[in-house]
Image: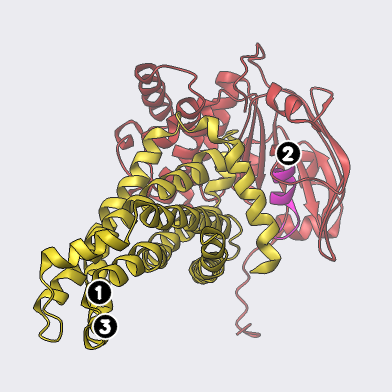
Chain colours: A red, B yellow
Amino acid sequence: MSDNENNHHSGVGLVVRGLRKSFGNQEVLKGVDIEVKPGEIFVIMGPSGSGKSVLLKHLIGLEEPDAGEILINSEPLTTPEIAAKYRMALVFQSGALLNSLTVGENVGLYLTEHRLKPAGEIKKIVEEKLADVGLKEAVDKMPSELSGGMKKRAAIARALVIEPQLILYDEPTSELDPLSAVVIGDEILELNRRIHVTSLVVSHDRDLAFGVADRIAVIIDGQIVTVGTPETVKNFNDPRVQEFLNADFKRDNKQPRL
Amino acid sequence: MFENIGEIVLLFWRTLLAMPQAWRQRDKIFDQFFEIGNASLLMVCVLSFFIGAVIALQTGPVLVERSLPNAVGGVVGIAIAKELAPVMMAILIAGRIGSAMAAEIGSMRVYQEIDALRTMNINPIHYLVLPRLLAISIALPMLVVFSVLVGWFGGAVVADLNHRMEIPFRVFFADLRDIVDLKDVANGVFKSFCFAVIIGTVSCHQGLVTIGGPRGIGRSVTKAVVNSIVLIVIFDYILTRFLLK
């Protein structure tokens, strides 16, 4: 996130303590506590409207908490200087590519706007990052020409250009077919293996969560209900968690729902 | 509209503070300038010609009947330079460019593109507002100068060809030169600069505060145009009062 060069090339640790946020009368986060270890893939699962995306926006500085604190490598994320010290990137649910720019321009935007490299070098880095996510041939395409999965992969490439120490994924597999979802999941694992970035994934996709997570937290109604390894969470004895994890379609001919 | 005046003034102030970034944003400023200027030129031409023509048509016969044919050039010249060209062009640009600014920025806001800029530490004021505000502040006064010339020409054509006036071209412009000063044109250009700042700031602000989906974008576009026009008319009076001193 910063123009400043810093020497941290591995992932950062993240601690969230007592985070609260309300919009009007509606309390969305009711004292969230989580601890993410450096280099870990940490997945926050929960039903729609449970506060996952709002939590993510707090971590990247798009929202300010009503109460509580966020620590990165034990430093409170309260000033722009601390935020600028660590490189963080968010992969938006929609990709959030700038529609007026080509895919290549989108991926190189951070470097271009902050004038961190000469144009030739930026071009090379963009091609390299797009190749990393299998989109080398899409460099001159407009975002409107890409499929949903390609947009998300382009958004990951844009995040990689920042060389993040913490990468946040907001519903990375939503609106994707199962094959594209697997590609994105593999991408998250591969990045974590290759650059040891700390990854925080917010998702309600159970397959993705149990496929990539080192640890999982389940958030329901703005509160963390449980945190642990995928196995621990799967066996956690709470009816709300079990209902969420085991929800499935049931074809019942005797009592049609419609 | 009035509850947002504070936010609009704050946005303008923040854009002024961002002015040292202007050189870095020169490509975007040029793109916007081209979009505003070049794309509006034909419309400005048609509108200005007929404004000049209709002013000559309305005032000319009345003045000629009262034995004041040498006032026609001056009346048309003053009306266009000081009032009609700046105000009409500002209204045209508010409708054409202000709406596009609000729609583009509003859509970027709704589809999280502005959030994406923030996560990359790119200030949306530097990236989006500054180029648009600077481009419109340069383009609108230039369009107004063009509009004044075309408007005078429209008035001269009608004064010459209309059988109730029949004021030759050369005489029309000689009369116009007797009455209209360079200062009068400068007044109109200054007004148009102020109107450009209003349109740019109001439209960008409206885009940045857009909420909701396509309906929200539509609402922002309407508000940007209506609020700009209302402020243009109010400031037109204030500026005219001030410039008359």
Chain ID, mark 1: B
Disc 2 versus disc 1: nearer the observer: 1
Q: Which mark is residue B63?
A: 3
Share a chain, discs 2 and 1?
Answer: no
Q: Earlier in the sequence, mark 3 or mark 1?
A: 3
Instruction: Report how far apart the C-alphas of labels 3 and 1 lie in the structure.
Output: 7 Å
At numbered mark 3, what does the secondary structure look like: helix, strand or loop? helix
Q: Chain of mark 3?
A: B
A89 left or right, relative to A64: left
Image point 12% across, 63% down: which residue?
Answer: B170
Q: Quadrant of the C terminus of chain A?
A: bottom right
Residue A200 is one of the magenta-drawn residues = no
Q: Which structural element holds mark 1?
A: helix
**Other residues around mark 3 within 10 Å, as few (<14) / some (14–19) / many (≥20):** some
- Amino acid type of disc 2? Leu
Q: Residue furthest front?
A: B67
The quarter of the displayed image where residue A196 is located: top right
Q: Amino acid at mark 3?
A: Leu
- The residue under label 1 is which amino acid type? Val
Is residue B157 or residue B26 the one in the foreground? Answer: B157
**Residue situated in front as seen by the camera: B2 or A48:** B2
Q: Which residue is mark 2?
A: A59
Q: Nearer the viewer, mark 2 or mark 3?
A: 3
Helix, strand or loop status at disc 2: helix
The residue pinned by badge 1 equals B72
Q: Does the magenta run of residues contain A54?
A: yes
Q: Residue B11, image x and y in percent?
A: 62, 49
Residue A179 % position (x, y):
45, 46
